[in-house]
Structures are given as structure tokens and as C-alpha cells.
Image: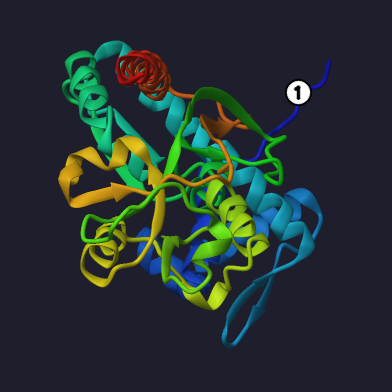
Amino acid sequence: MSTIILPKTQHLVVFQEVIKSGSIGSAARQLGLTQPAVSKIINDIESYFGVELIVRKNTGVKLTSAGHTLLAYSESITREMKNMVSEMNNLSFSTVIDVSFGYPSLIGFTFLSSMIKKFKEVFPKARVSMFEAQLSSFLPAIRDGRLDFAIGTLSDEMLLQDLHVEPLFESEFVLVASKTRTCTGTTTLASLTNEQWVMPQTDMGYYKELLTTLQNNHISIENIVQTDSVVTIYNLVLNADYLTVIPRDMITPFGSDQFVVLPVEDELPIARYAAVWSKNYRIKKSASVLVELAKQYSAQNSERRKQLTITEQ
């Protein structure tokens, strides 16, 4: 059986840096190599595959279709190499472990602090990077390996066949206003057409479904401000008499006496939360521990909400 000679991993790293930097000269400076050395590596890779990978121009480099294919595979390979090194270091506890993930505001308001505290007890030297946003914003970073996983709300329009989805919990969302507003019984969304609204910025997921629900009830998109800032949402509700729809659990941290929940006859969409990561990468042990902790605290929070509901009844 003949032995297949594989491309050198370092050559793939150089290739990626050329694309990232935009030119061979810039890549050479970033890598501490000479420009002829970088050019030779690119030529060697092209000779190995027998195709042109980049088009060299005075303004920089441009990927060919073959170059795009190689870039996707090479990023996956180097990402797995980094994961391998991280896992091996984890076994010896000799170096810092890196883990990065994304999460929505609800997680930050509920069990994130407990989850991270417990995680650091298991991995005290771990370097954790956390990013707050809607799940749709995280999907590109999950797919290219910049994030180990993310937590967020799912919707039927999301194309997640290439991602592993671990369901966590469902959440009740409520219509919220400032306490200065007088609440007189149950209302309808259709009766709120002249109100000003503020919602999280997203192009898919729960809030995209909610925007559709509002528009179906004749609430104009011009009356809806969208932002990725939770602080801005709270300020507009408290200080500018805006309406919003948020998880019930997000009211308490800022003081339930500052808000009033407006009962509505209309059925609001149910938000389904899940942890999501790429099927193209083997999830790191540190990331899998965080996912398991998220499952545990999700179950605890769900049980607590059930008990509160029973008490209220």
C-alpha cells in the first residue's frame, strides 16, 4: 500500500495568513518570514494540488474557487489541531485551557454566574471568553470554529443540519411596560398599534417570530425600535414609555416594582432554548462540561418556575 504524502500543516497556516492579511507581503510580516519564502510556500501548495489557489494582484490576493475550498478545509484542520493540543494539555494540566461561547441575555440574568463558578472549580486555570447576543449572530462563528458553542432560541427557519442541537428549556415571555402605566385588565396586541416598541435585533429565532406576530396584529415596523443592547431596552421601557416582550425571569434582576406585566389575550410564541455547536469539530472537554452545566441549571430553573407557578395559583 502506497503512503499518501499530506500537505504540511504549517503551509496551511501560511496560506490562511495570506488570505487573512490580504497580501503575501503583509502575511510575511505577520509570520516573521521573508516574502520570497511565503511565495514559495504558496507555490508549493498550488503545485501539490495542481490548481491555482489565489490570484495575485497589485491590490492584494483573491481566492479562486479551489482556494475557497482549501481555505474551508484548512481552517477546519488547524482548528482541530488546536483542539487536540488543548485536549492534550488538559490531560497534563500544564497550560491554560481556552473555551469560548455565546449566550443570550436570559442566561446572563439567570444561571450564567452559577454555571461559570462551578466550571472554574473544575477548570481553575481555564481562560473563558463569553459573548452576549442572539443565536443568529453566533452561527457564523460556530461554523468556522471561533466559538466552541452557543446558547440561544431556535426557530423552524434556521438551517442547522450541520450543527449539533442540545435542547435546554422553553421560556415564557411576557409583555412589559413601565410601572407608570396603568394596567386595566387584559388587552390585545391589535389595540396597541399606536404604541412604541423596542425589541432585540435579530434576523431569525424567537424575536423574528415575535416581530411577525406583531405585524400580523397591525403593529407597524416603523413603531418598533431594534437594538442589541439590553440596557437600552430597559431604559426605553422605564424612561420613554416603550413596550417590550422579554422572558419573565428578566424582570426581577432590575426590580419587579419598576415594571408591570400587561396581560394579553394573544398567544405569544414560545421560545425554545438550546446549546448549539458544529458537527465538523469534536467539541472540547471544557466546552462539553459547560454544556452539561447549562443542562443542569436549565432543569433546575425549569423546576423552580413550575413551583412558582403552583404557588401563584
Residue holding disc 1:
3
Q: Quick check: 269 left or right of 162?
A: left
Q: Position of residue 180 (x, y in %)?
A: 21, 61
Q: Quick check: 40 left or right of 134?
A: right
Q: Nearer the viewer, residue 157 or 286?
A: 157
Give the quadrant of residue 292.
Answer: top left
Q: Position of residue 104 (x, y in %)?
A: 39, 43
Label 1: how many residues lie within 10 Å, few (<14), some (14-19) or many (20+)? few
Q: Is residue 159 above or below residue 289?
A: below
Report the amino acid beneath label 1.
Thr
Q: Position of residue 114 (x, y in %)?
A: 21, 23
Q: Is residue 9 above or below residue 275?
A: below
Instruction: State the residue at coordinates (29%, 68%).
Output: 241
Q: Quick check: 204 left or right of 198?
A: right
Task: Look at the image and name its color scheme.
Answer: rainbow
Q: Nearer the viewer, residue 1 or 205?
A: 205
